[in-house]
Amino acid sequence: MRLPFTHQQFLDVFGAFNTAWWPAGLALWLLSALAVVALARGRVPPRLLFALLALHWAWSGAAYHLGYFATINPVARVFGALFLVQAALFLWVGVSRQPPPFTWGRAPRQWLSVALAVYALAYPLLVLANGLRWPRMPVSGVPCPTTLFTIGLLLALEPRRHRELAAIPILWALVGGSAAVVLGMVPDLALFAGAICLVTYVTLPRLLDGRAA
């Protein structure tokens, strides 16, 4: 896989983005952490989680892809548009009369949901452990941790409703995971695992629900 930018250019984009917008990234991380705690306690309305996911995808699409990444990668304009479409899908489902609930329990997919959500929250620390330093590093509010967090929450949804929500996250997990191999972004390799989990859950939901297919 050949990329239209260098590793240094990639990190420079994060440096510029984080320097300008770090309060927004911190706010998204805090909101996400609060949502995970509330979900663990079973005290979060589905509409709030859909709104949070829409915010993540809209911010990653508009601010990061269109505002910064497009300066070194022309295809980022397509990525930005797809991220905005995903944000609109989350808003559409979230304002429906009865949005599906997010639940955590003892099913395999719910344990995977917890693991991916926590992994997404720990993402900044994992990136630091990978050898990168602030501000030239990906943190909350950019595409890969956003996708990991999203896949985690989608695994907490009832499987037979709104499968269309999975398509773009799976696509970006494959794109971002492939780029991670080239760029040496080890924390992003979890995107492949997330994609496998979500594809399995969408196509064979009983398998990850702990029941025979």
Image (cartoon, grey):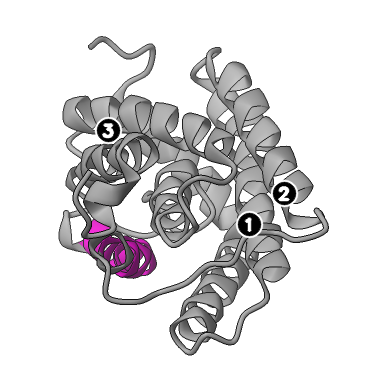
Viewer-proximal residue among 141 and 194: 194
Q: Which residue is mark 2?
A: 93
Amino acid type of the residue tagged 1 in the rendering: Trp
Residue 54 location (% of width, % of height): 67, 51
Q: In terms of secondary structure, what is the magenta stretch mainly?
A: helix
Q: Residue at x 22, y 48 (%)?
A: 207
How far is disc 1 from disc 3 in space, using C-alphas? Answer: 24 Å
Which of marks 2 and 1 precedes in the sequence?
A: 1
The reply, left or right, for residue 145 in relation to residue 167 is left
Q: Which residue is mark 3?
A: 177
- Identify the secondary structure beneath mark 1: helix
Instruction: Residue 113: name its quadrant.
Output: bottom left
Q: Which residue is mark 1?
A: 21
* Badge 3: residue crowd in 10 Å (few <14, some 14–19, many ≥20): many
Q: Residue at x 53, y 38 (%)?
A: 163
* Badge 1: residue crowd in 10 Å (few <14, some 14–19, many ≥20): few
